[in-house]
Amino acid sequence: MKAMKPLAIETLGLSGHRILSSGLGFGDNFSGAPFFDMLCNDALPSLRDLWLADIDNFTSGIRELVRVINLGKLSSLESLDLSETGFYDD
């Protein structure tokens, strides 16, 4: 199998996409692991800004995102928008 060429994407805006909370599974039954593993340095080495605002049922997705960041897989990330995800709610 031929290796995938890294993409030069610097900003990925997925805010408000309902497919993320249903189809790709940031809901109760899916952790979001496959999605965040795709965002690793190998595939998107230039990713600086990730916009994930206004995504419903994102709690498990945030846990998975934190795991990926802690593993150093998003080392170029400078800006992360999690507004209106419920993450900041009291």
Image: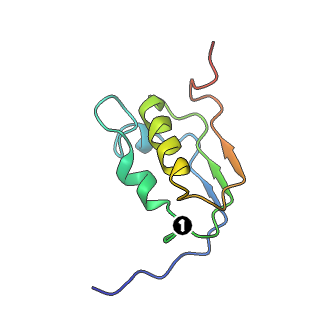
Residue at (42, 37) in percent of width and height: 21
- Given residues 54 and 37, the one toward you in this image is 37
State the image coordinates of residue 69 (x, y, percent, origin top left): 55, 50
Whether residue 17 is situated above or below residue 45 in the rendered picture:
above
- Given residues 79 and 18, the one toward you in this image is 79
Colouring rule applied to residues: rainbow
Residue at (63, 12) in percent of width and height: 90
Q: Which residue is mark 1?
A: 41
Left or right of residue 20, residue 72 in this image: right
Total tally of numbered discs in the picture: 1
Left or right of residue 49, residue 58 in this image: left
State the image coordinates of residue 56 (x, y, percent, origin top left): 48, 30
Left or right of residue 56, residue 90 in this image: right
Q: Residue furthest top?
A: 90
Whether residue 44 is situated above or below residue 74 in the rendered picture:
below
Amino acid type of disc 1? Answer: Asn
Q: Residue furthest bottom?
A: 2
State the image coordinates of residue 65 (x, y, percent, origin top left): 50, 44
Q: Residue furthest right?
A: 78
Q: Residues within 10 Å of mark 1 (few under 14, many from 20)?
A: some
Q: Secondary structure beneath disc 1?
A: loop
Residue at (43, 43) in percent of width and height: 20
State the image coordinates of residue 13 (x, y, percent, origin top left): 61, 52
Q: Quadrant of the N terminus?
A: bottom left
